[in-house]
Amino acid sequence: MYFEGKLTIDPSELTKIERVKPEKAFKKLLYFLTSGAVSDKVEQETFAAVAILQQLNRCFRAVKINNIIRLSHDNIDFYLDTEGKTDDLKEALEQYDLELGEAMSSHFEKLELVLEHEDAHFKYLIEIAINRTHAVGAYPIEMKVSGLLNDFAGNDKAEVESKMRDIFSTQEQYDAFTKQKQAYFENWLNELQQAVKSFMKVDDVQLHVKRKILVSDQKPSKSADIHFNRDSHNHGMYYGYHNYDNFMFYTFLWSSMSHQNHIYIHDTDLIGDEGDYLGNIGDEGVDAGDSAIFDPDADMDTRTQGFDDIDADSGDHDSGGDDGGWFGGDSDYSDSSSCSSCSSCSSCSSCSSCGGD
């Protein structure tokens, strides 16, 4: 299991709505017959790349994020850290500013950043997509934060399973541990959200959180055995950034240990090897020991048949959508366990997950 948060940001900048040629066949016909009067509409942002990056930099500094992995401009990498450098955010932004220049700052369709951060509880991977053109009503800036549990970092199966064993000893232990860790994760995301509100000119920021469990046919005996897909950098941590294999290794063991110990799983998204959405287990839950989905000895065809028994329409489809980005066009975090109206979930009476408890 790991946690994933999504922040969507609407900056206080002027936007203009443009007509664009439709993609669907019938609307294409109407588009030509009406000389463009019948068309799709998109919003186009007017902000400059350098200005947005400067604002984001102030947000990151406020929460002590200073390590960047990737900075891409329309799928061209201006910075990519393959060595595990630290405190390189300033270096990357200066390199981007120097190579791009102010004159070209407004000429982009998408900026993408990948940053990392670590505290006592989590190794965070922070992915940011800044879209100049987007659907009407959608927010142009999206942050996806993946939180890997620090407790189980390691590269050897026996060592990592030993660290995890107590958590899976009883359902009560499991529930208490995951509830506590989710609270830590949400508190940190609330700090990030407040930094965005404080250091960026924004009209609105939305925050939502999900639990994720990896369902994989890989059976690595050590972290070096994990197969990553580097054909595209749109797979988030499943791309295999420097040293993430040691932090991710436990996620390949979580489903099998849940199966072995008959752990009751609920309110959780199931994710494939490349971060692809497989399905969602709702609040009704399942006994992982009785489900083929979590059985490490079953082949993937048998395991995926178990998805018919879960709600496949209630999760977020991160790797789907038409834009090919990290979040895709159909992301739905409406069942999130965190609210966007408060700085601390425990102080809010409107949050659907805590009820103000």
Image (cartoon, helix red, strand yellow):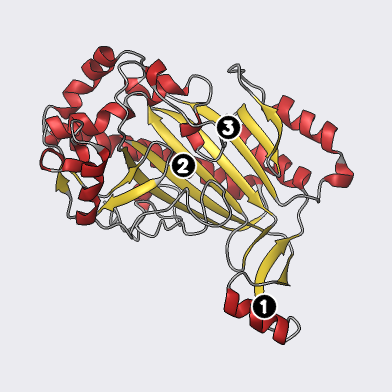
How far from the left and from the top, in percent, is residue 88?
Answer: 67, 23
Residue that carries the numbered disc 2 in the rendered image: 189
Q: Which SS class for mark 2?
A: helix
Q: Which SS class for mark 1?
A: loop
Q: Tell whether label 2 touches label 1 (CB within 8 Å).
A: no
Which one is nearer the viewer's eye here, 159 or 9? Answer: 159
**Mark 2: few/some/many CA within 10 Å (<14, 14-19, 20+):** many
Residue 177 in view of the camera: yes
Q: Amino acid at mark 2?
A: Leu
- Mark 1 vs mark 2, foreground winner is 1
Q: Which SS class for mark 3?
A: strand
Residue that carries the numbered disc 1 in the rendered image: 39
**Relative to 235, is 312 on the left or the right?**
left
Mark 2 to mark 3: distance in Å? Answer: 14 Å
Mark 1 vs mark 2: which is more N-terminal?
A: 1
**Mark 3: few/some/many CA within 10 Å (<14, 14-19, 20+):** many
Q: Amino acid at mark 1?
A: Ser
Give the numbered dot on residue 329.
none
Q: Residue at x 83, y 33 (%)?
A: 99
The correct choice, above or below, for 343 with respect to 223 in the image is below
Q: Residue at x 67, y 38 (%)?
A: 58
Residue reaching furthest right? Answer: 103
Mark 1 to mark 3: distance in Å? Answer: 38 Å
